[in-house]
Amino acid sequence: MTDVELINLIKHDDPRGLGTVYETFRSEFVHWIMRIQRCGNEDAREYYQASIVILYDNAKAGKLDELRSSLKTYLFGIGKNLVWQRYRTNHRDEVVGSEFYIKNYLFEDGDSQAAEEINLEIISRCYEQLGEPCHELLGYYYFGRKNMEEISALMGYRNPETAKNQKYKCMERLRKMVFGNLQSQPAEPKPVNEE
Amino acid sequence: MNPNLYDIDLIQRYLDRSLTDSEKVSLEERLKNEPLLKTMYLEHQQLIKGIRYSYLQNRLHQLRTLESALPPIHAEKKGRQVWLVTHWKQATAIAATIAFFVIGFMLWNKPATPQELYAENFKIYPNVFEPITRGETPLSKRTEAFAAYEGGNYAEAAALFNHLLTEKEEAGILMLLGNCNLVLGNTSEARNQFIKLINDFDDLDNQAKWYLGLSYLKEGDAKTAQLIFQELSNSEYSYASKAKQLLNKLD
């Protein structure tokens, strides 16, 4: 399979794409990280899994649509960035999980707040408890990067404006669950009715 | 428009970089002067990152499932060669010890039967195609099929996968159905599914060859299994090392 075909499979969430990439570069990448980082197999695999997840996110965002290098070079480039990221933190001598790199990646675009200050796990948990249609709608918008016209067609809303109102309600519900319950358990999800 | 909705819309378009220059300047000015709006902006940004994190965590979970089914990654040969040169005394001692145990093993143990090698090497292929997420209620036949597979109800999963295949042939479903049939002892059916995967689809070839080889081992046909593992051992994928290990045991 060519790089373009693989990227296309990844973009469309076809598990064969990510699975093939994962198996193809696994051994070479892990050995490379073990060599340059002088770390163990387990630590190197955490780097690898985080790099693959970041590659997946970039493919979904369309950043690989006009890739000039090979997919392998791109993947190893992500790995190199993670190594530098690790050097800049206080976690140099301990094994850290892939989640560490993924959180840092989400906050690398110059946010004022550090990743550690924001409990992504709580937001993620509340989002999973949000219920439908909010879970699906917010997923389409913020992860699937679909616009309101596409969402209204996919979810059967009358028009994009209705979908937009629904999205606002869903974000409000999520915001209340997260920030209203940050110190305690997240609130029980309630159904959100379309207007 | 609800004033909050208006501001959230502005914030969203600011994050999407779709505001006009004048709208952008105006919003940035308001963010400096209106603490409530600034808080709303920061919270909104955090929620978006949390949603994305949730999706990326799910992908990570899938990769970990896949990793658990792959063979371990061994140390590089180059490093081993350097170590052998610099530590030749220890290497000789280790080699002598290994030789002692290997000879002892050969003298006192019969070679493993194909069926024993099957049992030693068969590991059910993980459902990396449509993992069942927490809290998901099985609504469709499709979801039920994957849930049954993940739950280890292979007879139920096989019946449902067979039904799904009558509607549309998919590589992932063929792979999982083949695995169900191997577990259930329907080796010739499993073999049909793996052969179909190899002939009619471009993906999962190596995985299908691995399980096809195992199906022959299960029936005691070591010669055919050997041919398949021989071909697999020449590929560049991770199944190659697994196949080589098995071939060594079959020789």
Image: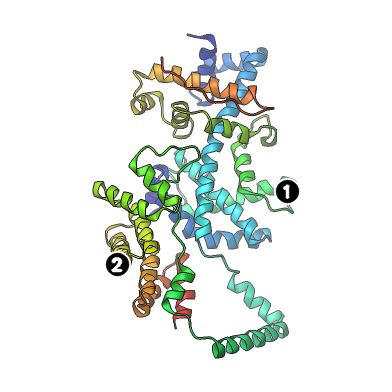
Q: Chain of mark 1?
A: A
Marker count (numbered): 2
Above or below for B67 versus B50: below
Residue A133: which quarter of the image?
top left
Across and down, in percent, residue A35 comes to 64, 63
Residue occupying the point 54% across, 31% down: A127
Horizontal side of residue B151 vs B175, given as left or right: right
Q: Is residue B19 visible?
A: no
Inspect the image, locate mark 2, and give the three-letter code of the amino acid beneath it: Ser
Residue occupying the point 50% across, 40% down: B134
How crowded pointer 2 is (Cα within 10 Å; few <14, some 14-19, many 20+) is rated as: some
Residue A44: which quarter of the image?
bottom right
The secondary element bearing badge 1 is classed as loop
Q: Residue furthest left?
A: B166
* Residue that badge 1 annotates: A91
Across and down, in percent, residue B231 comes to 37, 73
How crowded pointer 1 is (Cα within 10 Å; few <14, some 14-19, many 20+) is rated as: few
Inspect the image, locate mark 1, and give the three-letter code of the amino acid beneath it: His
Residues at marks 1 and 2, CA–CA distance in whole angstroms: 52 Å
Residue occupying the point 47% across, 40% down: A63
Horizontal side of residue B33 vs B124, given as left or right: right
**Residue B70: mark in rendering:** none
Across and down, in percent, residue B144 comes to 38, 44
Horizontal side of residue A11 vs B199, given as left or right: right
* Residue that badge 2 annotates: B188
